[in-house]
Image: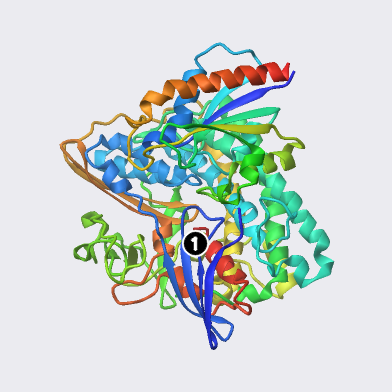
Amino acid sequence: MEKLLVLGIGNTLLTDDGVGVHAAEVLWKEEWPENVTVMEAGTFTQDIYALFQGYDRLLVLDVIHAEHEPGTIYELTEDDIRSNKKQRVSIHDIDMLDSLRMCEMRCGKRPKMEIIGMQPYDITTWNIGLSDVCKPKFDKFVAHTRKRINEIIAEMS
Amino acid sequence: MSGCKRNGAAASGKTAHIAIDPVTRIEGHLKADVTVENGKVVDAKLSGGMYRGFEQILRGRDPRDSSQIVQRICGVCPTAHATASIMAQDAAFGVKVTNNARITRNLILGANYLQSHLLHFYHLAAQDFVQGPDSAPFVPRYQKSDLLEDRSKDLKAVNAAAVDQYIEALDVRAVCHEMVAIWGGKMPHVQGLVAGGTTEMPTKDRILEYAVRFKKVRDFVNNKYLPTVYTVGSVYPDMFKVGQGHKACIAYGVFPLDNAYSKFMMKSGVYFDGKDHKFDPSKIHEDVKYSWFEDSTTGLHYSEGKTIPAPEKEGAYSFVKAPRYNGVACEVGPLARMWVENPPLSPVGQKMLKEKFGMDAKRFRDLGEDAAFSLMGRHVARAEESWYILDFIDAWLKEVKPDEETFTAYEIPESAEGTGFTEAPRGALLHYLDVKDSKINNYQIVSATLWNCNPRDDKGVRGPVEEALIGIPVPDIDNPVNVARLIRAFDP
């Protein structure tokens, strides 16, 4: 049976930057089949690849800056990220693609990744919780993710 | 893990200015501006462009929260920040920890040291010397990177072994994280380190869990990491001759061996002007003339320290303050600790130094000042320290008492102050805590990177890494690989 990892990442101390983690915290309270794991990885960087081991699919929840209205929800595939050189930036020079590659080197295989992201309004204020601009969009973000998880479950079976 | 990006080199006659921004494969953000003349660095400026503001965040909070919040300063060595913070709290609250707490704390920090040193060599610095596959995370890199196989085609096997170890080291580091988590709860950002001791008591099972994992790490350090550092070093004998800098260093003492904190695995001490000096915390002050902080806050002792940013300040070029000891710019880190402690070298080290360099070295200082204070000397110091700690961890595992108390209760006083001195894997670290109305009134952090990567001080003297950059060979301004090598040797 194929397995899916749903992974919220971001810094919950920086307002909207925590949206992926907050979404994971909602989703892991819900009932999922045993081949679905929901987890949050905060700002874990160099060693995040270790979490991917044994999964066939990876759904990452994070903020994405793509210059639309704050609260906009995006879906990205690995190819979307690869084709855009500018996206190969991360605060520790290790981005998700590098981590997938490390997982592959380490375990011989790696999951197929996709990302659901939200355009943030504020990622610099020290505060736990979303901005007033993004807060109303949060339920939609979670619902969107829930729908996608169910689609992936169907694809895997 | 991209290679360094060059923001542009402006060549005018024989002088070229190179800006590397950001310097990659380090912990955080750093920009290096160097001036090259006749193939050598003649001037350097290091700029930390990120304002952190942790000292402001902590103000007004419950002092016990500090050990959780400060761990977010560094994802590689949160345990060191937690250790400094809880030691500052111990001092402020007047609490004496039990023997068992001291040893458990050493075991948590020790496992993190091994993880950090392996991370630094294999996953951050080794790519300056070893040719990995042509895919991420090994690319992009400089066109002419002066790697092992560029120096000799005979080194294919050495290179291949180092790449295999890169992958193996990922595993070993995961094991180190597990060792931290046994008593720390999780890694990064442990919950097990608290004022008064630790939250988890060692049990027979937990000690065994730690010991089993430790054996794997021990074997890797002995059989792979240590020999590989010397083998790589032997291909770069020129790197033992560059990057000396001020030849001044400071260590606060780490891994206490008694409860009076009078004996340490790595003792405290200061070295400058070719002489050893006793460490006296009152001689530390921080200059800010070239830092983006209010001029009125310059020259202060950390206990009087203020953090008032002035990002528009004329002439300033960094968010790093410039700490000085007795007015001297001192470097910190494994080299500083090894130089101050001067422990015996590993059998592997002694053998390889003899075979490859014709050196008869029994203890660290036998390397001599010039080779020790060098680009490659800093890598050797880190590897030797990783070996040196192994027997201590073994001894602590025997010394720690199962099911014996690791926590001492305390009251938070209304007003008090305390300083925690420790060493992060990357160097000397102090946290100063001032409590008023049982809340944090002032919190000051002088971290390792502050000591190493600081800008000029009020007298115009360069910081340690800036000074160590002087004389670094840059034969080709399009490939300033040695500049990145030197900066990374400090593990910033």
The chain carrying label 1 is B
Q: Quadrant of residue B413?
A: top left
In the image shown, does B139 or B131 lie closer to the viewer? B139
According to the image, label 1 marks what residue? B341
Image quadrant for the N terminus of chain A?
Answer: top right
Image quadrant for the C terminus of chain A?
Answer: top right
Q: Quadrant of residue B321?
A: bottom left
Q: Position of residue B58 (x, y in %)?
A: 28, 42
Q: Quadrant of residue B124?
A: bottom right
Q: Amino acid at mark 1?
A: Glu
Is any atom of residue A142 visible in this view? yes
Is any atom of residue B398 visible in this view? no
Answer above or below: position of B314 versus B446. Answer: below
In the image shown, does B217 or A2 lie closer to the viewer? A2
Q: Position of residue B333 (x, y in %)?
A: 48, 60
Q: Residues within 10 Å of mark 1 (few under 14, many from 20)?
A: many
Horizontal side of residue B68 vs B485, given as left or right: left
**Residue occupying image coordinates x 41% and y 42%:** B72
In the image shown, does B385 or A84 lie closer to the viewer? A84
**Residue occupying image coordinates x 57% and y 38%:** B177
Q: How is the rendered protein coloured?
A: rainbow
Secondary structure under tag 1 reads: helix
Answer above or below: position of B171 versus B185. Answer: below
Q: Position of residue B52 (x, y in %)?
A: 35, 50
Q: Residue furthest bottom?
A: B13
Horizontal side of residue B338 vs B256, given as left or right: right
Horizontal side of residue A80 vs B311, given as left or right: right
**Count of residue discs:** 1
Q: Residue furthest front?
A: A68
Answer above or below: position of A132 versus B73. Answer: above
Q: Position of residue A140 (x, y in %)?
A: 46, 21
